[in-house]
Amino acid sequence: MSEVEIRFLQQSEASVLTRLVRETYGDTYDAEWVYQPEEIAARIKDGRLVSIVGELDGEIIGHVALSREEDDAPVMHSGVAIVTEAARGQHLFTRLKQFASEWAHQQKIFGIFSEATAAHPYSQKANIDLGAHETGFLLGWIPASVSNNAALNTQDAAHRQSVALFYLKTNPAHKHSIFAPARYQPIIKNIVTKSGLRGELKPAPANTTIDDLTTFTTTHKDDHNLSIITVAQPGQDLVAAITDETTNLFETFNRDAVYLDFVLSDPATEIVLDEHLDLLPFSFAGVFPNHHLDEDVLRLQALPKVEIKATDISTASEHGQQLLDFVLTDREQKLTT
């Protein structure tokens, strides 16, 4: 039997990735560029995309991508994971991820973030086996409209599915102070310690100045019927500003889910959320990189119309289960207050 070769996808092979994505996800994958060979080639050329494939007897049977917004970003995102039927039983996903992590280590990349479906534990276990750790759970992130031929059964696609967030440390990162509201400090400290993320929790300086106005941007993922509010600077008007925006997203855009990001390196995050967190309709999701801020962020989530069942969400480690329990408990408390 021939050996599977793990290698980099070349610019000239960009259409191969588009074909793989269409065969696996149809037209439902949540990144438009994967359907654009010219854009794939451009990203490979300028270093924003590192595309890794498994090849058997001249056929591409698996793929994993490492991507970043800038070619010198110290943390990358792993996605576009595809394993075809021809690769079943060869642990190709793990081999592709291992190849990616070794390359990242050689390139002095601090680490790799990724998401894994929480509909089953297998993808999560593959990440854990490589040394990655859970940093959060995005409840209801995947809509029923997203198709994946690897889904366990048709019932899994009948409602929005959740994903586990992972971080794989590939090199020591520079230490810096991070600031979080008291309510979430223990869980964030646990996440940072377990995963090897950058940042050391510190109390916000007493002389921190809080602006009057909150500055934020909102991005939309229409294909997932969700929006992400990125707070660049929390201000005294946080509750009014975010409540107005959230109400608009749920009532005008009819969103299923809204996620809210705060930069952890800003001491105003701790001060403002300590005062206003209970007044916001959001609960804890995890720690995650936000490309608009080029920082790790505290991500919160609101899905008031979506039914979330603990029995629908799988984990693959004790740490993951403890983190999920916190996420679900915090959401339940928010819904009942």
Image (cartoon, helix red, strand yellow):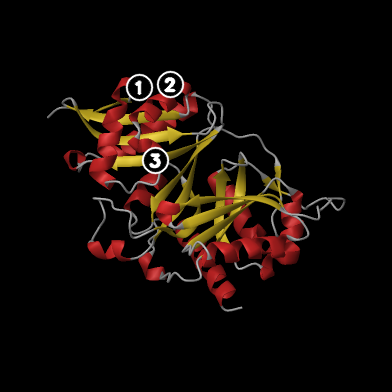
Left/right of residue 130 with respect to residue 83 in the rendered view:
right
User: Which residue carries the number 1 mark?
Assistant: 11
Instruction: Specify the amino acid type for callout 3.
Output: Glu
User: Is residue 88 visible to the viewer in this orientation of the structure?
Assistant: yes
Instruction: Specify the amino acid type for callout 1.
Output: Gln
Ranked by sequence position, the earlier of labels 2 and 1 is: 1
Instruction: Specify the amino acid type for callout 2.
Output: Lys
At 25% from the left edge and 51% from the top edge, which residue is drawn?
150
Structural crowding at the residue carrying mark 2, measured as other residues with C-alpha within 10 Å and reported as few (<14), some (14–19) or many (≥20): few
Ranked by sequence position, the earlier of labels 1 and 3 is: 1
Residues at marks 3 and 2, CA–CA distance in whole angstroms: 18 Å
Q: Position of residue 72 (x, y in %)?
A: 56, 26
At 64% from the left edge and 60% from the top edge, which residue is drawn?
184
Tell me the number on the disc at residue 32.
3
Residues at marks 1 and 3, CA–CA distance in whole angstroms: 18 Å
Numbered disc 1: secondary structure = helix
At 38% from the left edge and 25% from the top edge, which residue is drawn?
41
Numbered disc 3: secondary structure = helix
Do tag 2 and tag 1 residues touch (Cβ < 8 Å)?
Answer: yes
At 76% from the left edge and 52% from the top edge, which residue is drawn?
268
Q: Is residue 3 above or below residue 325?
A: above
User: Which residue carries the number 2 mark?
Assistant: 45
Do tag 1 and tag 3 residues touch (Cβ < 8 Å)?
Answer: no
